[in-house]
Amino acid sequence: MNSIKNYSNFVKFEHTLFSLPMILAGTFLAWGGLPNLKLLLLIILAGTGARTAALAINRILDRKIDVLNPRTKDRELPSGKLSLAKASAVTIAGLVLYFAAAYKICDLVLYLSPIPLVVFIVYPLMKRFTWLCHFGVGLGLALAPLGGWVAVTCSLHSIYPGVLLALFTLFWVSGFDIIYATMDEAFDREQGIYSIVARFGRGTALYISSLLHQAAFFSIAFLYFLMFKTIVAGIMVAIIGILLFLEQRKSANVDLAFFKINILVGFSVFLFVLAGIYLP
């Protein structure tokens, strides 16, 4: 039982609640509604495999840093609850699922599938040499709606609605990763780890985070005026804006801002797309 719990904690399946709504938003936006169930299942499997591999790679590459950090030293790898071999097996399983699903979707998805893997490897390393590392995390998740779009269309033609969703995700995730990094400000400075918080201080970092969330809001608003202009979708845009505002206001409570509010943001974006497609 403990072994199952360790695996579950290691891969953080609950974090799928950030990425899955964005994949589905890109999927439904590209299709103009509910796609066929086989394709939808393949997209969900690809997204689950990619997210599992991404988090496992992150944990593996960061294990020597995590063991020094009081906040992360009890994670599965640094604490020894999970061996490096088992963590590597989780990574391989995630990648097999991801590439197998990509293969079944279409040739273009398969050809493009190594790109996210490169991002998954590079972004955990960015904190070692640049305070722009938050944008690496943002880019990784921004690929989710693009992946959903390309999986449906099997084309890069007229991809601009998917790009707007990706821009929203990039700005949103980069902004909340800055908030998350405020927990490690002292540790990052002590260990020479790069972050906007360590480089500019908490106050300036939160201001930058707020600017990114404003950019995220304008991205989703632009998508609204470009694609939908319906009443219910407009209400969802307003709700997304309120949630992003609350995330900034509650930045001192990282658990609330990072996890609970962000889950609501992700699902609100998906509901925004559904409202734009189905409701007046």
Image (spheres, helix red, strand yellow):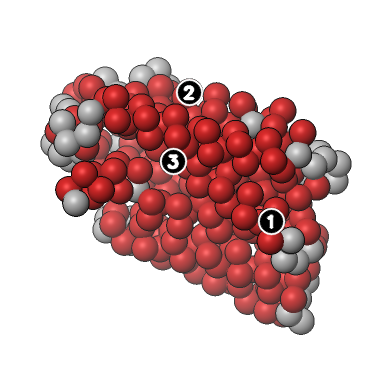
Q: Which mark is residue 242?
A: none
Q: In which quarter of the image is residue 60?
A: top left
State whether residue 130 is above or below residue 230. above
Q: What element carries label 3?
A: helix
Q: Position of residue 50 (x, y in %)?
A: 52, 39
Q: Nearer the viewer, mark 3 or mark 1?
A: 1
For image coordinates 45% across by 35% down, the residue present is: 93
Q: Residue 122 carries which label?
A: 2
Q: Which amino acid does label 1 sit on?
A: Lys
Q: Nearer the viewer, residue 93 or 260?
A: 93
280 with respect to 89 (left or right): right
Q: Nearer the viewer, residue 263 or 81?
A: 81
Q: Is mark 1 on a helix, strand or loop?
A: helix
Q: Mark 3 points at which residue?
A: 52
Alpha carbons under labels 1 and 2: distance apart = 32 Å
Q: Position of residue 213 (x, y in %)?
A: 52, 52
Q: Disc 3 or 1, which lies upstream in sequence?
A: 1
Q: Position of residue 176 (x, y in %)?
A: 42, 48
Q: Can residue 263 be seen in this view?
A: yes
Alpha carbons under labels 3 and 2: distance apart = 16 Å
Q: Which of 196 and 117 is in front in this view?
A: 117
Q: Can residue 186 be seen in this view?
A: no
For image coordinates 38% across by 51% down, the residue present is: 13
